[in-house]
Image (tube, rainbow, N blue to C red):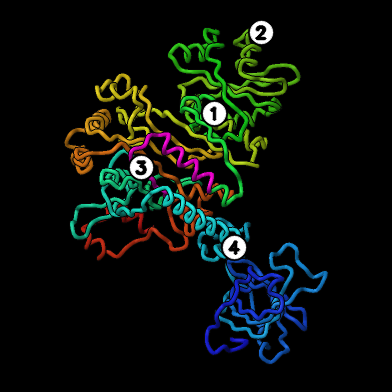
């Protein structure tokens, strides 16, 4: 139906949300969706919505040209011509940006009718699955539109900032080469070269280093990356990265540029001045907070009572300290009234993080209570409680295990209590750098050393000889020239100074257990490029989705991605991944296994 027939689609003169008292008396043409409709007998009021906001429109259906406007319904798309007028005193809506005015319609054209939507626009009580299935409807909500617009603004600021800092934007291939030392690749079979595969890039790491060898000097790219890994709220199988690489720099140069970028982003998008970027080594961050991405807004910190409990007579503690491991602790004030059921849940949480068990000591009514109290004299037990930071009415949690296991288990409790007891200062964002990561970590499963970050990161200068000389007994002590920018408990950006000498890169591959044949097959093009004059270089990669998530103040990456996937890497809207025609597989030279066939049929 059409309440009026324009000769052709009219030209929009204003967005709905742009109108205000300065437009009083003006004739305007606005377009959008009917957000709400109210029939007041003689007059019909609708709120018309576009991405800039809402405006109230008054329609008099008694007029010949507007008679059928009474049929308008929610989510119909309409064009309205009318005159802006100030609302009468007492009718101003102070909660609406356009609340001082309304539009008195003179012509209405229905551009598209709509069935009743299966979800309410902006209804947060709808299940996540339903919102993802009808994502195009959910995107009409004010909240999601503001997030996507913030993403756009972020990208514009980043591009301007990096361009002003002499960086050149270069696109690198999406169809590329599968390389080890990372998450699983997404593979793409080649039709032209059957039996061979491309890989979707997990990051353009070697490519951006090749750009430095190619003399580009400073590069950046807003790139898509793909990782076939288990997901969680802040990860997606495909994601966006702000990729930066710079020649003739050291770690301080790279970090200084990122700090300036943060200051610009937070100033322009949040009107906040960021001044502090404290630095902390990996070991200090783990020791104090139990994680290499601590939330500094949480005041709780871990302690170490290894020396206090050394040779105390309690077998678990004694054996832990004797083999060179640690006894870490976390004190929580005012938590002495935790029930046994609550303590059991916290024990289960620590075990999920790899701990063999969790010791708790709680203070209540002047007495200390703990399952291990019977193993100690009262004075010694009190000494341990106080050394761990315990206070009257509080509780102390203790984990005796390997350093990283103990830290990770107590970090989970730190995060739990920070949220449960509202200890986190959400009024501001806290940034920090974590540096001096281990260059390697030992994989018990693979029985070899693996790169903590990736095999192109160099070590600190004082460890270089140990790496080149292949002193494997000391590999666990080598420190990387790597750095992570952390904000509110999230890794926002991570990078390193790269290996630029061929002999050092060869030593790294050897330390990782690669044979010469494997190096040539996987990285031959890159190793050869290192022969022809490689400048010292380093870089960093930002998680764009995570960055926008923090800027918007939400806690899920899917909120700031137009069309996200679920935790099972599925798109509920497009119903993908999906089966393809047998003819397509035949062209690619691909045959499904019986297991895959059965799975696809479900």
* Sequence-first disc among 1 and 4: 4
Image position, residue 176 (x, y; %): 27, 51
Mark 3 burial class by Cα count in 10 Å: few <14, some 14-19, many 20+: many
| Cα separation between marks 4 and 3 | 40 Å
Nearest the eye: 441 or 118: 441
| Cα separation between marks 2 and 1 | 29 Å
Q: Which range is magenta?
A: 240-264
**Residue 340 visible somewhere in the drawing:** yes
Image position, residue 442 (x, y; %): 35, 27
* Sequence-first disc among 3 and 2: 3
Residue, x 47% and y 29% (percent of image)? Answer: 354
Number of labels in the image equals 4
Mark 1 burial class by Cα count in 10 Å: few <14, some 14-19, many 20+: many
| Membership of 255 in magenta stretch | yes
| Cα separation between marks 3 and 2 | 59 Å
**Residue 408 visible somewhere in the drawing:** no
- For this view, does 168 lie left or right of residue 276? left
Of badges 3 and 2, nearer the viewer stands: 3
Discs 2, 1 touching: Cβ within 8 Å: no
Q: Secondary structure at mark 3?
A: strand
Residue behind mark 2? 379
| Cα separation between marks 1 and 4 | 38 Å
Q: Is residue 23 above or below residue 501?
A: below
Residue behind mark 1? 289
Q: Secondary structure at mark 2?
A: helix
Q: Secondary structure at mark 4?
A: loop
Quadrant location, the N terminus = bottom right
Residue behind mark 3? 246
* Sequence-first disc among 1 and 3: 3
Of badges 1 and 3, nearer the viewer stands: 3
Residue behind mark 4? 141
Q: Tell me the quarter of the picture where residue 109 sits.
A: bottom right
């Amino acid at each position: 139906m059409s309440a009026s027939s324009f000769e052709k689609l009219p030209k929009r003169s204003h967005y709905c949300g742009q109108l205000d008292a300065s437009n009083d008396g003006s004739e305007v043409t606005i377009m959008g969706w009917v957000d709400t409709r109210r029939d007041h007998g003689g007059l019909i009021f609708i709120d018309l919505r576009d991405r800039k906001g809402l405006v109230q429109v008054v329609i008099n259906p008694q007029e010949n040209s507007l008679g059928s406007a009474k049929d308008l319904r929610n989510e119909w798309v309409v064009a309205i011509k009318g005159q802006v007028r100030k609302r009468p005193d007492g009718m101003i809506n102070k909660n609406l940006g356009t609340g001082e005015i309304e539009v008195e319609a003179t012509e209405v054209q229905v551009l598209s009718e709509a069935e009743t939507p299966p979800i309410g626009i902006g209804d947060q009580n709808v299940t996540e699955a339903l919102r993802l299935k009808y994502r195009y409807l959910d995107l009409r909500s004010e909240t999601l539109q503001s997030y996507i617009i913030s993403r756009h603004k972020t990208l514009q600021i980043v591009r301007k900032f990096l361009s002003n800092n002499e960086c050149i934007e270069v696109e690198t291939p999406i169809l590329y080469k599968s390389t080890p030392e990372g998450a699983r690749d997404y593979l793409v079979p080649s039709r032209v070269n059957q039996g061979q595969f491309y890989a979707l890039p997990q990051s353009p790491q070697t490519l951006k280093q090749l750009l430095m060898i190619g003399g580009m000097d400073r590069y950046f790219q807003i790139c898509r990356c793909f990782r076939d890994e288990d997901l969680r709220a802040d990860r997606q199988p495909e994601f966006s990265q702000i990729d930066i690489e710079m020649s003739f720099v050291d770690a301080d140069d790279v970090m200084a540029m990122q700090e300036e970028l943060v200051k610009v982003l937070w100033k322009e998008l949040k009107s906040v001045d960021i001044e502090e970027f404290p630095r902390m080594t990996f070991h200090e961050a783990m020791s104090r907070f139990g994680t290499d991405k601590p939330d500094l807004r949480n005041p709780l910190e871990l302690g170490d009572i290894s020396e206090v409990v050394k040779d105390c007579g309690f077998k678990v503690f004694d054996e832990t300290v004797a083999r060179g491991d640690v006894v870490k602790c976390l004190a929580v004030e005012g938590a002495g009234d935790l029930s046994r059921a609550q303590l059991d849940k916290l024990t289960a949480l620590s075990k999920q993080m790899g701990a063999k068990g969790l010791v708790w000591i709680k203070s209540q009514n002047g007495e200390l209570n703990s399952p291990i109290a019977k193993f100690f004299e009262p004075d010694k037990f009190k000494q341990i409680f106080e050394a761990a930071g315990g206070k009257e009415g509080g509780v102390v949690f203790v984990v005796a295990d390997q350093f990283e296991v103990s830290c990770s288990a107590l970090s989970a409790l730190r995060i739990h209590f920070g949220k449960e007891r509202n200890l986190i200062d959400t009024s501001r964002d806290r940034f920090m750098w974590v540096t001096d990561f281990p260059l390697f970590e030992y994989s018990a499963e693979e029985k070899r050393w693996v790169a903590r970050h990736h095999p192109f990161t160099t070590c600190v200068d004082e460890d270089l000889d140990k790496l080149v000389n292949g002193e494997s007994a000391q590999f666990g002590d080598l420190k990387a020239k790597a750095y992570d920018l952390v904000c509110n408990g999230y890794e926002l950006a991570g990078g390193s100074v790269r290996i630029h000498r061929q002999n050092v890169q060869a030593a790294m591959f050897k330390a990782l257990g690669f044979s010469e044949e494997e190096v040539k097959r996987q990285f031959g093009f890159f190793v050869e490029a290192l022969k022809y004059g490689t400048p010292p270089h380093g870089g960093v990669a930002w998680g764009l989705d995570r960055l926008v998530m923090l800027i918007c103040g939400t806690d899920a990456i899917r909120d700031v991605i137009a069309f996200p996937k679920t935790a099972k890497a599925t798109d509920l809207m497009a119903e993908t991944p999906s089966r393809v025609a047998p003819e397509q597989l035949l062209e690619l030279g691909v045959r499904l296994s019986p297991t895959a066939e059965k799975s696809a049929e479900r």
